[in-house]
Amino acid sequence: MEMRRFEKFFVNSWLINFIYKHTRYNSFLNFISKDIKGKLLEIGCGIGRTSHSLAEKYKNASITAIDYDKDQIEIANKNKKSLKIEFMQADATKLRFKPASFDYAIETNVLHHIKNYGDAIKETRRVLKKNGYFYLMDISQYVFTLPLIRYLFPPESYITKDILIKKLEESKFKIEGSKGRYIFFIAAKKVR
């Protein structure tokens, strides 16, 4: 789903990204606690700010960063700072990559924007190599109980950490860790 105009303005703003990067995103990167090497798929890269943070932290990773919104990808390509990142428009529920193409996958606050987020999980599993890791950071449905939040930032799916863990396990991921309630993190491993 493409974000509404206000939501896109909000998430692309410098101030929100500064706050986000220095609060939740750094906590998420610390949660990962692995030195990511190899091929990394970033699902829902937006205008590429998180992609550049990933490239800075994981020097030995090559990053394919996708977003459903063509405008976001256009901005990401204009602001590209690293040769290790390739930005492309793609639908997370219908990835165009061969099976077992990536060592890692990361999504940050994207699955609640996808109506059929279970399909995105299955596609992520398909493109991950055996023993590949999927790291997720998303927003719980509890945040959207506030009417103003729900109106300004309408989700396509209402999820919680527990719902997402169950969906990951159904897709044959092994959960290796989780943290948080309103904004939560999950580490999942493709085991077979």
Image: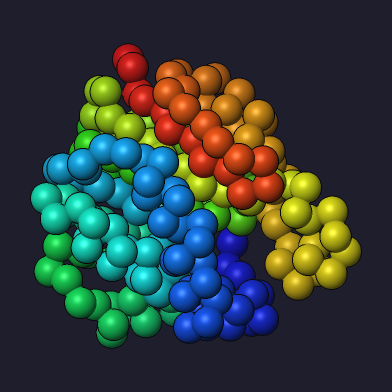
- Taking depth in this image into account, of 182 and 92 the one nearest to the observer is 182
Can the viewer see residue 119 in this picture?
A: no
Screen quadrant of the C terminus: top left
Q: Position of residue 87 (x, y in %)?
A: 28, 66
Outermost residue to the right: 147
Q: How is the image coloured?
A: rainbow
Q: Is residue 25 above or below residue 176?
A: below
Can the viewer see residue 84 in this picture?
A: yes
Q: Position of residue 63 (x, y in %)?
A: 22, 56
Q: Is residue 191 above or below residue 155?
A: above
Task: Residue at 54%, 20% (x, y): give it.
Answer: 170
Outermost residue to the top: 192
- Taking depth in this image into account, of 90 and 178 the one nearest to the observer is 178
Screen quadrant of the N terminus: bottom right
- Taking depth in this image into account, of 57 and 122 the one nearest to the observer is 57
- Image side of residue 17 versus residue 128, left or right: right
